[in-house]
Image (cartoon, coloured by chain):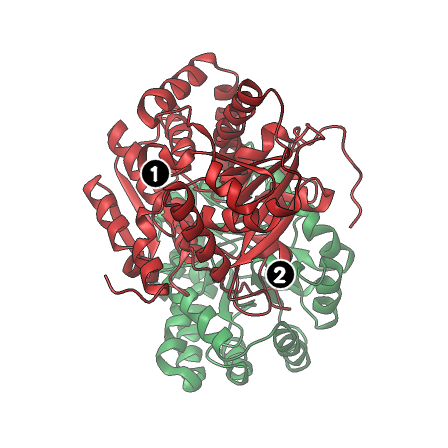
């Protein structure tokens, strides 16, 4: 599809929440008035310096921002091409970028007078981040998690419980992330009067894709300023892993109108694009799910297919609508790497830089491994290290045939 | 007069019955649809199964999964509608479901195929008035009624937007929640229907949580129609391929209560 080239890539969505043909508000009527309320409250918050001041203060003193910008010398040398830099969002409190968004959303929930928080989680990172901010602000918290994921992510389930959250295993469907999201939506429909739904990625009905992007854009804003301060110029290529796409849009968005900066989103190709995978852009087509229109893995009748990835955080059959739009406009290039390539990237970073990454950014590292050698030595790649790998050591050990 | 308009102009409140197409198998659905008509249903809602039925409770979720596991395709559902229309030329048939299966081949394709199959109306749970352009224009152009939902959260200011571009009837969802067992107090239903009818010029049918003749009768005293779904789905879940008989019995009891609700009152 040949979409017209816009004057700016940073002025989406439109007033109805559409990113080109994507996004929108495809929700049951019960939720519609609440979605409109949320949008109105977000407009007010966005214009309120006090809201930004509280958000910034919590990010600095509670989350630990700004996160460092790090040049990876041994990885760069090993790959023998472009300089590789990382935005170290794995050093945030709770160990991933998810907390940035949770801080923003719980402040909105409090502004709206909501007294109960719900969230969905796949790998458990967003669940832990949500449980964390709920403990911090003293709000009761219910986390919906697929029963399959509960079984394979026990450490995070225990973390959420320690933080005071109720974890509800969801047995419907395939009992993974999309089913957890269905169940969270069902709970929300039944409790709209007092409940705020903290969605974990830049997807769902408008205004979620916009507000999650805005909260996560702290990543790209910091990185842009840090890069200018450190090397006096912008990077040539940004790389980030994509499940729903919140860490990627957070890094990319502040750079979208810098024409010299190329961007690459990395989807999870699982066992391979011709087999089980979670690459919605590469292997899906546009459709409607979970409140927005976007690329989805689906059959010819529009029934949703299960995603597969070694990374539970990328294991979702859709993608945030802004990424769907950025793909169609051609502003961002999207690629995918397999489970095996991600495992290689994971070990490569451990060995060369002494950093154990989560399996999600291991996909970005695998893409960097492929592209860095093809670029000049004075070129700069900036990749988002969006989470640390502590949570993944059990699954990595299993895949490497090591018994712990 | 359209089939839907006739169904609400019989001189008594209408009974609207919902079942999921292809539950438990595509082969079983025609006999169940016949049982609804024989029992006295005035409008048939045929659910299109979807992998992710976000507005439905456990009973209808499982019906969706049973149907998909039995291999039900969109083409099968359109065939069920075509065959139903041949057997029952006068009974209105409404397809109800989620957006993605309806728009995946393009809304015009879906509207044309549904019209050809004799479908009178379409309820799409996750297309609110704000996204009407996704399906509404195609349905209206094909002569199919887009039927919208109003809920306890739909206030007076919003109601005209919900009614705009819809026809056939308005489906009032009596509880803020999912389909299933939770039911609203009669007083709140009466208040809501009275309020809605000040604005709405089309009939108002009330559903969600209506399971028994004892519940349906009093609602029929205040509404133009009563929708029953999960209670029928539960019977199908219990009796499987042999569900037609028990379904007919419950529908007959519901129809008796709904059709005579105002006579009893008078």
For residue B147, say whether it is visible.
Answer: no
Q: Colour of chain A?
A: red
Tag 2 subunit: A
What separation in Å lies between label 2 and label 1 (alpha carbons)?
Answer: 30 Å
Foreground residue, B29 or B134? B134
For residue A288, say whether it is visible.
Answer: yes
Crowd around label 2: few <14 · some 14–19 · many ≥20 (10 Å): some
Is the C terminus of chain A in the top left, top right, bottom left or bottom right quadrant?
bottom left
Tag 1 subunit: A
- Which label sits on residue A192? none
Point out residue A389 in the picture as x, y percentages from the top left corner. 35, 47
Q: Is residue A34 above or below residue A127?
A: above
- Residue at mark 2 shares a chain with residue at mark 1: yes
Foreground residue, A277 or B83? A277
**Nearer the camera: disc 2 or disc 1:** 1
Q: Which chain is green?
A: B
Of labels 2 and 1, earlier in sequence is 1
Residue receiving disc 1: A95
Q: Quadrant of residue B104?
A: bottom right
Residue receiving disc 2: A283
Q: Does residue B74 appear left or right of residue A33 in this picture?
A: right
Point out residue B245 in the picture as x, y percentages from the top left corner. 42, 84
Q: Is residue A212 above or below residue B163?
A: above
Q: Residue at x 55, y 49 (%)?
A: A369
Foreground residue, A112 or A175? A175
Foreground residue, B141 or B260? B141
Q: Are marks 2 and 1 in contact (CB under 8 Å)?
A: no
Tell which residue pokes out farthest to the top in this image: A49
Q: Does residue A153 appear left or right of residue A241 in this picture?
A: left
Q: Secondary structure at mark 1?
A: helix
Q: Secondary structure at mark 2?
A: helix
Point out residue A294 in the picture as x, y percentages from the top left corner. 61, 50
């Amino acid at each position: 599809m040949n979409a017209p080239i816009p004057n700016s890539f940073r002025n989406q969505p439109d007033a109805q929440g559409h990113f080109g043909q994507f996004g929108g508000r495809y929700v049951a009527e019960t939720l519609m008035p609440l979605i409109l309320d949320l949008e109105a409250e977000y407009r007010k918050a966005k214009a309120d310096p006090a809201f930004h001041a509280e958000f910034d203060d919590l990010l600095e003193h509670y989350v630990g921002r700004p996160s460092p910008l790090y040049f990876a010398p041994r990885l760069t040398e090993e790959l023998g091409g472009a300089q590789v830099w990382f935005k170290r969002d794995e050093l945030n409190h709770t160990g991933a970028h998810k907390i940035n968004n949770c801080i923003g959303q719980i402040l909105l929930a409090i502004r709206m007078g909501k007294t109960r928080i719900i969230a969905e989680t796949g790998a458990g990172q967003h669940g832990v981040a949500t449980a964390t901010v709920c403990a911090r602000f003293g709000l009761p918290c219910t986390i919906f998690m697929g029963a399959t994921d509960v079984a394979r992510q026990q450490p995070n389930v225990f973390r959420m419980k320690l933080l005071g959250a109720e974890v509800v295993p969801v047995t419907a469907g395939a009992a993974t992330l999309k089913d957890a999201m269905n169940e969270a939506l069902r709970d929300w429909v039944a409790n709209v009067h007092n409940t705020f739904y903290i969605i974990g990625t830049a997807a769902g009905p408008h205004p979620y894709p916009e507000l999650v992007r805005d909260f996560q854009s702290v990543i790209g804003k910091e990185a842009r300023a840090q890069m200018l301060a450190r090397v006096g110029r912008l990077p040539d290529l940004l790389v980030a892993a994509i499940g729903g796409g919140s860490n990627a849009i957070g890094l990319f968005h502040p750079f979208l109108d810098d024409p010299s900066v190329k961007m690459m989103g990395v989807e999870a190709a699982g066992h391979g694009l011709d087999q089980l995978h979670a690459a919605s852009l590469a292997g899906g087509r546009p459709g409607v799910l979970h409140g927005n229109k976007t690329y989805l893995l689906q059959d010819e009748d529009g029934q949703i297919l299960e995603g597969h990835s070694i990374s539970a955080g990328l294991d979702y059959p859709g993608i945030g609508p802004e990424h769907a739009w950025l793909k169609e406009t051609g502003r961002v290039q999207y690629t995918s790497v397999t489970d095996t390539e991600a495992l290689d990237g994971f070990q490569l970073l451990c060995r060369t830089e002494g950093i154990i990454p989560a399996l999600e950014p291991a996909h970005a590292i695998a893409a960097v491994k492929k592209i860095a050698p093809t670029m000049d030595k004075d070129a700069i790649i900036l990749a988002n290290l969006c989470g640390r790998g502590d949570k993944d050591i059990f699954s990595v050990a299993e895949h490497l045939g090591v018994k712990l | 007069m359209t089939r839907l308009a006739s169904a609400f102009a019989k001189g008594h409140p209408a009974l609207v019955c919902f079942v999921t197409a292809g539950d438990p198998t595509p082969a079983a659905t025609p006999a169940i649809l016949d049982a609804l008509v024989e029992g006295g249903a005035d409008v048939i809602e045929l659910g299109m199964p979807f992998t992710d039925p976000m507005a439905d409770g456990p009973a209808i979720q499982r019906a969706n999964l049973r149907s998909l596991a039995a291999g039900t395709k969109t083409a099968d559902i359109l065939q069920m509608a075509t065959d139903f229309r041949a057997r029952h030329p006068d009974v209105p048939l409404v397809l109800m479901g989620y957006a993605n299966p309806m728009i995946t081949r393009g809304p015009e394709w879906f509207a044309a195929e549904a019209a050809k199959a004799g479908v009178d109306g379409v309820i799409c749970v996750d297309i609110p008035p704000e996204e009407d352009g996704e399906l509404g224009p195609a349905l209206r152009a094909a002569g199919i009624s887009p039927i919208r939902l109003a809920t306890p959260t739909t206030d007076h200011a919003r109601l005209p937007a919900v009614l705009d571009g819809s026809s056939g009837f308005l489906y009032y969802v009596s509880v803020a929640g999912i389909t299933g067992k939770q039911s609203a107090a009669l007083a709140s239903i009466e208040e809501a229907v009275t309020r809605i009818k000040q604005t709405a010029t089309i009939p108002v049918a009330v559903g969600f949580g209506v399971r028994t003749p004892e519940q349906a009768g009093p609602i029929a005293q205040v509404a133009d129609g009563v929708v029953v779904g999960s209670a029928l789905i539960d019977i199908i879940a219990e009796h499987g391929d042999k569900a037609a008989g028990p379904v007919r019995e419950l529908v007959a009891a519901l129809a008796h209560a709904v059709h005579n609700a105002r006579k009893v009152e008078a």
